[in-house]
Image: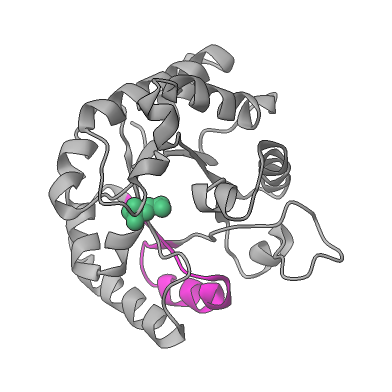
Amino acid sequence: MRRKIVAGNWKMNNNMSQTNSLIDSVIKKINFDTNCEVYLSPSFPFLKDAKIKCNSSNVKVLAQNVSHHEKGALTGDVSCDMLQSIEISSVIIGHSERRTIFKENDQLLLSKIELCVKNNLEVFFCVGEDLQARNSNDEFSVIEDQLNKTIFNLPEINPEKLVIAYEPVWAIGTGLTAKPSQAQEMHNFIREKFKNKYSKSISDNLPIIYGGSVKPESAKDIFDQSDVDGGLIGGASLNPDDFIEIIKSI
Ligand code: PGA
């Protein structure tokens, strides 16, 4: 059976005490049986403490970003080795905010993915079309292009170390969620592409999660789609009750 995953992406929110109390609340509230893997993604300065806090639970810690170089004169960057040294073994790559605000292009994202693979880090790789592409019915070609220029350059992949997050840019932080049928259609498309590129067994085992304004009210219908294996949650993950409701929707 494919992994089920709900990850909270806290982005650049929460100082140290807010981060710590949010982690405590989430851990305390996950007092029910679930087959869903839960990840929390605080900012860099708090990853080590988050990891220590989460060690007593099943909750995992996810970095929001990593450098495209191994080491060197890159002021402000954080390397794979640095993350590994504080026992962080999962990282988000290619979030649309990194692509648009920080101008990270496919070539740079591929370098990040390759370094993560080399350093045995699990990658949450985000793809998603913007509103213009959606309105001109170009969403499938945009996603295909994003995959072709990044992940699909890898000769092989390990579906246990890769999670694809389909995040339509027009749905991120906007309150507009993709319709469950739109999410299913795109997730199925992505799964087919992985099947054609690698194998049926890889594509069958690859978790593909949805992100973009998922709320407790909308989570269940989206997660019920056969090719949707969970969610990458931004805004709603800052509220522990909402986040827990979303986890329970799986
Ligand atoms: P959102 O963010 O849930 O606030 O739309 C999702 C994301 O950016 O990963």
Q: Please tell me in which quadrant of the rendered image residue 29 appears.
A: bottom left
Q: Which residue is at a point 23% across and 65% down the rendered structure image?
A: 30
Residue 48 lies in the magenta stretch: yes
Q: Which residue is at a point 20% across and 46% down the rendered structure image?
A: 219
Which image quarter holds the N terminus? top left
Residue 15 lies in the magenta stretch: no
Which is more toward the observer, 52 or 12?
Answer: 12
Q: Which residue is at a point 26% across and 49% down the rendered structure image?
A: 214
Which image quarter holds the C terminus? top left
| Tally of numbered discs | 0
**Would you say 110 lies left or right of 211 here?**
right
Q: Please tell me in which quadrant of the rendered image residue 77 appears.
A: bottom right
Which is more toward the observer, 137 or 121?
Answer: 137
Residue 145 in the image, given as x and y percentages of width and height: 58, 24
Note whether 151 is above or below 209 in the view shown.
Answer: above
Which is more toward the observer, 87 or 114?
Answer: 114
Note whether 75 is above or below 160 in the view shown.
Answer: below
Residue 84 in the image, given as x and y percentages of width and height: 66, 62
The magenta region covers 37-60
Which residue appears farthest toward the bottom when viewing the image?
17
Residue 36 in view in this figure: yes
Which residue appears farthest toward the left when viewing the image?
217
**Would you say 143 lies left or right of 166 here?**
right
**Would you say 36 lies left or right of 79 here?**
left
